[in-house]
């Protein structure tokens, strides 16, 4: 009886050893190694705003000499616009980095719709309020009433900070954090990639390889 038990154990041991060896050499093939998951482009994780406004540049202690209008312009002298036959502003070399295109057909391309011709360091809203260059949101609001109301209500733009105003302040991004005042149409951006399937999915629900952005 005892020897019978020993025999069975010996056979089982050999079987298990063979099985171990077969797994070791991969006799039945191996599970494919999952492909390394590519890292997400860090630009998608950046919470910085689309555009640094003048106020942001001042806060970050960056070089803002270009905003110092009276480095080049003459003070106490009304600036006249240099217009072509169609009434479009001809920009001098010093301002060639400004790309003017506000509205379809350049409806709002006149510099003095926003800048004060008598004091370039200030903005002037449509209802004739003088504003500092770093406080441009009420300027935009003076022409874009409905969007401004949406923005105030938190339905346009981005709100950060606290929902519970008793706990702290809610902060709203300025219009110029997202819109270039000179060419305000929001440029299209590449969408961030969808979640990565850890394994190959035979019939994926949701985004397929074709419309998966990298
Ligand atoms: C680096 C020098 C420089 C700086 C800084 C500068 N400008 Fe000018 N700007 C010029 C020159 C040069 C002209 C063309 C000559 C002129 O009209 O005086 C001009 C023209 C203009 C015009 C008339 C555009 C046209 O072609 O008819 C406006 C408006 C203007 N500037 C606004 C500003 C404002 C606002 C600032 C500050 C936020 C500013 N500039 C800062 C050099 C400068
Ligand atoms: C003097 C009036 C006026 C002011 C001030 C003004 N806008 Fe506009 N804006 C317009 C007009 C007019 C249009 C064109 C509407 C159209 O073409 O149907 C426009 C169009 C736009 C558009 C649509 C995109 C486009 O180019 O067609 C955006 C976005 C915009 N403005 C943002 C702003 C922002 C941000 C500010 C403040 C920096 C601002 N606007 C200040 C008059 C103004
Ligand atoms: C719709 C309003 C609007 C119009 C029209 C406009 N500007 Fe501006 N501009 C602004 C605002 C607002 C700022 C400050 C933006 C910021 O905070 O980044 C600014 C900034 C500037 C600056 C500082 C540096 C820069 O490039 O941002 C210059 C120079 C300037 N404007 C010149 C002009 C000239 C010249 C024209 C006409 C060809 C013009 N602007 C038309 C609203 C306007
Ligand atoms: C967080 C970013 C952000 C902020 C802040 C923001 N906008 Fe926009 N805005 C957008 C985007 C995105 C669109 C949609 C562009 C598109 O559809 O192509 C847009 C569209 C617009 C349009 C086009 C017409 C419309 O209403 O659909 C106007 C005008 C406009 N914004 C004005 C403003 C004004 C004025 C402010 C400030 C009071 C502001 N925006 C603040 C991102 C922003």
Image: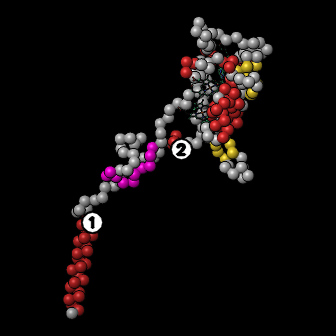
**What residue range appears in magenta?**
193-203
- Per the image, the residue denoted by label 1 is 23
Query: Magenta: predominant secondary structure element?
Result: loop
At 70% across and 21% down in the image, what residue appears? 115
- Residue 96: % across, % down: 59, 18
In the image, farthest residue toward the front: 146
Q: Residue 165: in sight, yes or no? A: yes
From the top left corner, tell me how far across and down residue 59 is, in percent. Answer: 70, 36
Residue at numbered disc 2: 45
Distance of label 1 from label 2 (alpha carbons): 42 Å
SS state under label 2: loop
Picture coordinates of residue 73, whole percent (x, y): 72, 15
Q: Residue at x 42, y 50 (%)?
A: 196
Quarter of the figure with the C terminus? top left
- Most foreground residue, 20 or 35: 35
Q: Quadrant of residue 117?
A: top right
Tell me what residue is drawn at x 69 percent, y 22 percent: 114
């Amino acid at each position: 009886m005892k020897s019978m038990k020993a025999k069975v154990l010996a056979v089982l041991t050999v079987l298990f050893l063979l099985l171990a060896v077969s797994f070791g050499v991969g006799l039945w093939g191996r599970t494919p190694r999952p492909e390394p998951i590519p890292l997400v482009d860090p630009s998608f994780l950046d919470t910085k705003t689309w555009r640094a406004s003048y106020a942001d540049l001042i806060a970050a202690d960056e070089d803002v000499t270009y905003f110092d209008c009276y480095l080049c312009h003459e003070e106490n002298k009304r600036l006249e616009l240099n217009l072509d036959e169609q009434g479009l502003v001809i920009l001098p070399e010093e301002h060639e980095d400004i790309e003017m295109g506000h509205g379809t057909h350049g409806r709002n391309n006149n510099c003095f719709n926003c800048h004060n011709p008598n004091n370039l360091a200030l903005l002037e809203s449509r209802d004739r309020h003088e504003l500092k260059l770093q406080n441009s949101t009420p300027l935009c609001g003076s022409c874009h009433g409905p969007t401004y109301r949406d923005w105030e209500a938190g339905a346009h733009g981005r709100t950060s900070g606290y929902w519970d105003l008793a706990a702290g302040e809610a902060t709203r991004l300025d219009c110029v954090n997202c819109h270039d005042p000179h060419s305000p149409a929001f440029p299209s951006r590449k969408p961030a990639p969808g979640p990565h399937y850890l394994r190959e999915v035979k019939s994926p629900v949701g985004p397929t390889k074709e419309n998966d952005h990298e």
